Amino acid sequence: MRRFLLLATVVCLTVVGTLSAASRELGQGFLDHGVATPISCHRGTVATVDGRGRPVVLSWLMDHRGAYELMLVDVETGKAEEYPTPFPLGDSPFASLLSSANKYYTHFGSHFVEFDPTCRAFTFCRKTSPQMAMSMTEDNRGVIWSATYPQSGVVSFDPKSRELKDYGHVYRQDWAQYPRSVAADNAGWIYLGIGSTACQVLAFDPKSGKASPLVPEDQRRHGSGYVYPGTDGKVYGQPNSSEQGNWHVYYQGQAERLAKRPATPAKNIITGSQGLFHDVFPDGSRLTRFDLLERVLVVEAAQSKRRKSVRFDYRSEGAHIMGVAAAPDGTVCGGTSFPMRFFSYDPRKDQWVNREAFGQWNTVARQGDRFFAGSYGGGRLLEWDPAARWVDTVPGKKESNPLFLAESAPTINRPHKLLAHPDGRTLVLAGTPGYGYTGGGLLFWDRKTHKQELLTHQQLIPEHSTMSLVALEGGKLLGGTTTAPGTGGQRKARQAELYLLDLATRRVEWHEAVLPGVQNYTDLCLGPGGLVCGFADRSRLFVFDPIKRKVVHQEATLERFGPTVSQQGPRVFVRGAKQEIFVLFARAVAQLETDRWQIRPLAPSPVTITAGGDFLDGRIYFAGGSHLYSYRVGE
């Protein structure tokens, strides 16, 4: 089986865009400043031919809505044809396959689809059990198989009979499974390699519709099973791909241990993950560049090696914004995801700058004259000096700006909170751990000594991750946890807690589930008198007294205001110029009146607010999908 990964040439990341925003009035004090990153991300791209033998490129495109279309680009003319996703949006491919019969398949959003480039149309679409394929394969009869997240679903499609069989979820666990590899033997059995909480290889019998686990429970460890189809009709793989050796051959539902790595090559199947990039056309020419930013592709001839550059165009609503904060240079900055880009908006010039980002900037914060980001994956901490020239981030390169400071994976993989401590030198990064793990830690960075310290969840509160943080007087931190594990992990804690940590000793002095049943302390903010206000589960305002270690006020807010904003770094609370505390709900902007701890609505939002949030020159800035918006306080 051939595996194709996302190539660096898919998007030309070195290009810098500087664009006028042409902000638009929305009424009631709201402004739409436009799209931060006006490009899409590919989620599976293949080079092939159409019905007339003309070379074409097929590419699933994703913006903030999910995968919204399949684009077909005629390599000779550059004409792009866009085919809207034939089912409701909101999900994206994690696996695709170009079959031996030149049909392009994928399975996401609980729908299995076939696209035929010979007639340039979707020729099959059928709803299935949830949710999306994490791997796909083609058996020796030409039947297409998909293995799906989150509970090892199995679907087959016979292109000849046009019959789709949905076998449902065949192997249930109490955590979301990633079946990242699937293979078929020539006896008709299907094998799934599963992770990440505990590795497994499943043998699935289509005749009975039942799956049998081949890795004994006492041998399952963190990691993923791996399988591939061999050219001899058998399947090969490992119970855990992160471990050396331990190769097996799988046939007719049975597993046999091998003494060494198999010499049998993988069957040539054009499939892969969301990064699938099959670059070879049937005539041997190669797609050497497919640039969604510059909207250009380059094809290299098989024999002469002569290169041809062709421009194309497509529609996009832009990448979704992870969160925003005011930077020291008077701009509003943040990051987008898919593609992962940095953006800066200058309200004075009404102008954008868009650049390559090192990873996904989940959470951002300002401290003094610098701007910091907590980046996914790897739980990375970056420092940007807006007054200096931008130099793309390279770990270990001191000239980089943003500068790579630290990495904390797997203890932290997906950052949720970056606390810029008021002492002016300490940064604290928090978040959930790596794939399949439970319990995240804290990364401390000292800007004066340039040293890091990483605490695990076992040193804090076992099986919890920190979602929110606030600095208190006396060198203390108040943290709010989430019971959510790392992606694909197993939830083990029953309810979230608040905790007090001494910054000097790095020790947790107290922790308690102060609000029974809560799973997530969404955000925290220091109020007057040393009291801390916060939101739990996006739906409950509370006020906590760190001295008495008790909740002194709480209010259910869901019915009146709806949920608060939600993002991997949510930034629900926004501090005003006079230290007012503003609150961002998904459909409204409000102010927290701290004398009575009452929420006063300021204005309903004309758009859904998806991420917060900062204050600059009288305006509250926030994200709505791919757009940056702001609200004038006092309108």
Image (cartoon, rainbow, N blue to C red):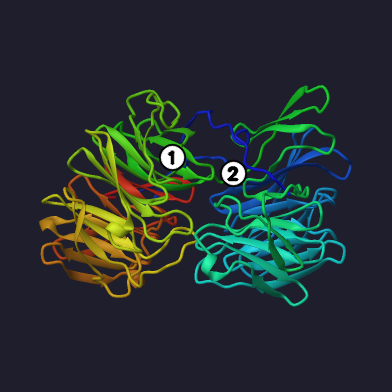
- Tell me the residue that label 2 is attached to: 41
Q: Position of residue 537 (x, y in %)?
A: 35, 66
Q: Indicate the secondary structure of the residue bearing disc 1.
A: loop
Q: Three-letter amino acid code at disc 1?
A: Ser
Residue under the image location 36 percent in, 61 percent down: 564
Q: Residue furthest front?
A: 259
In the rendered structure, the answer to whether residue 267 lies left or right of residue 377 reads right
In the rendered structure, the answer to whether residue 628 lies left or right of residue 156 reads left
Q: Nearer the viewer, residue 15 or 25?
A: 15
467 up-or-down from 386: above or below: below
Task: Give how far apart the Cα atoms at labels 1 and 2 are.
Answer: 25 Å
226 up-or-down from 342: above or below: below
In the rendered structure, the answer to whether residue 158 lies left or right of residue 430 reads right
**Residue 127 visible (yes or no):** no
Q: Position of residue 298 (x, y in %)?
A: 71, 29
Q: Nearer the viewer, residue 592 or 477?
A: 477
In the rendered structure, the answer to whether residue 386 lies left or right of residue 17 reads left
Residue under the image location 43 percent in, 39 percent down: 23
Earlier residue among tags 1 and 2? 1
Residue under the image location 38 percent in, 46 percent down: 408
131 up-or-down from 388: above or below: below
Q: Quadrant of residue 183?
A: bottom right
Q: Residue furthest bottom?
A: 208
394 up-or-down from 82: above or below: above
Q: Nearer the viewer, residue 63 or 173?
A: 173
Q: Three-letter amino acid code at disc 2?
A: Cys
Q: Position of residue 56 (x, y in %)?
A: 78, 40
- Tell me the residue that label 1 is attached to: 23
Q: Indicate the secondary structure of the residue bearing disc 2.
A: strand
